[in-house]
Image (cartoon, rainbow, N blue to C red):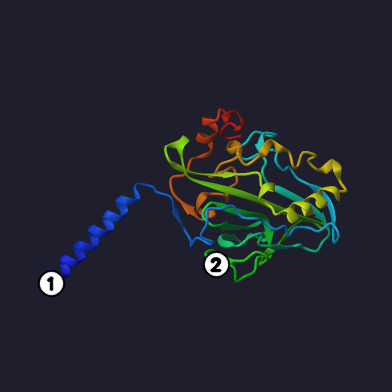
Amino acid sequence: MSKVGLCIAACILVGVIAACNMMGPGELTYLYDVYPDTEDPPLLAYYGPDPDQVGIDSIGAYGDWEGGGNAFKPGEEPATEIEIRSIGSSPVPLKAPCDGVLVYVNREGQDGDVSIRYGRRYVVKYLHVAGIPTNLRAGMKVRQGDLVGYTASMGPDMQFWELELDKLYSKSAAFGGRPLLVSVYPLPYFSQEAQAALERVRRAVQNQHGSDPDWIAPTSDPSAGWLASVPSHEMWAGSHKAGYDGPFVGLEEYLKHYGLEGILSPAGQ
């Protein structure tokens, strides 16, 4: 290589090193394009089971403590998701509740997952997803109302619909400026029309014994950041599967900070 070429190569290398140093060690990065380019929260639409079309068997824990398992002791698992079990053998279409970028697509039969990041700070997750269209892949943009899959069957005559919402704090002051991703109470992020639809679902429940009567309990408001953290107790919910990479705060450290490590299961149980 000529002296000029070596000089150019050296300058490029110095520039790359300088850029990396400016980023700092372990900075938060976005694995896919940001869309839309905002830090504002989404206004979610509801595309779940319609009680005018299907029977509603029950609703799961939503905003209160649920069964436990995995990382948490039984009965001490924070619940922030919406779970709806509808009656019928026909799957319910799952449509994107907001614009965004697909950051995770997991095809596992009746137990797949789809994750949509809205802007820079919010990630909407459908769990237990079946029939994900073959053309969907991580990195694709989606628009509100686009088909992303179908509800999973819980048996010969039951469909399962579950949605969760995560919020990113890119530099959490309580943890040395590291990023933090927490599950938040999703109801306030739905449009008024969607909230009215969810209330219709709640009123249509046929199996009251199988439902959580506190499914809209105010104990899980968006400011209650201790509810959950990623990496979380759900195997698939690592931060990279929410479309981020970086030195995220771990669940055990997070709960210990808030004096809640007692809800974790002992190792090996």
Name the amino acid, label 1: Ser
Location of residue 156 (image quadrant): bottom right
User: Horizontally, is 230 left or right of 23 in the view?
Assistant: right
Instruction: Find residue 206 and name its label.
Output: none
Residue 94's place in the image compared with 239, above or below, is below
Q: Secondary structure at mark 1?
A: loop
- Residue 269: image location, x then y, percent: 61, 34
- x 62%, y 36%: residue: 72
| 125 up-or-down from 178: above or below | below
| Residue 66 visible at all | no
**Element type where label 2 sits in the image:** loop
- Is 72 on the left or on the right of 231, as rendered? right
Which numbered disc flags the more N-terminal residue, 1 or 2?
Answer: 1
Bin the neighbour count of mark 1 within 10 Å (Cα to Cα): few under 14, some 14-19, many 20 and up.
few
In space, the residues marked 1 and 2 are separated at their CA atoms by: 43 Å
Q: Does residue 240 appear to the left or right of 144 in the view shown? A: left
Residue closest to the eye, 67 or 96:
96
Residue 19, percent from left and from top = 30, 55
Of the residues shown, which amino acid type is indicated by label 2?
Answer: Met
Residue matched to label 1: 2
Residue 27, horizontal then vertical, whole percent? 40, 49
Q: Which residue is mark 2?
A: 140
Residue at 56% across, 57% down: 117
Determine if residue 61 is in view.
yes
Between 69 and 205, which is closer to the camera in this rendering? 205
Mark 2 crowd level (few <14, some 14–19, many ≥20, 10 Å Cα): some
Tell me the quarter of the image containing the N terminus.
bottom left
Tell me which residue sits at (77%, 63%) in the image.
Answer: 91
Above or below 268: residue 121? below
Q: Residue furthest left?
A: 3
Across and down, in percent, residue 5 comes to 16, 70
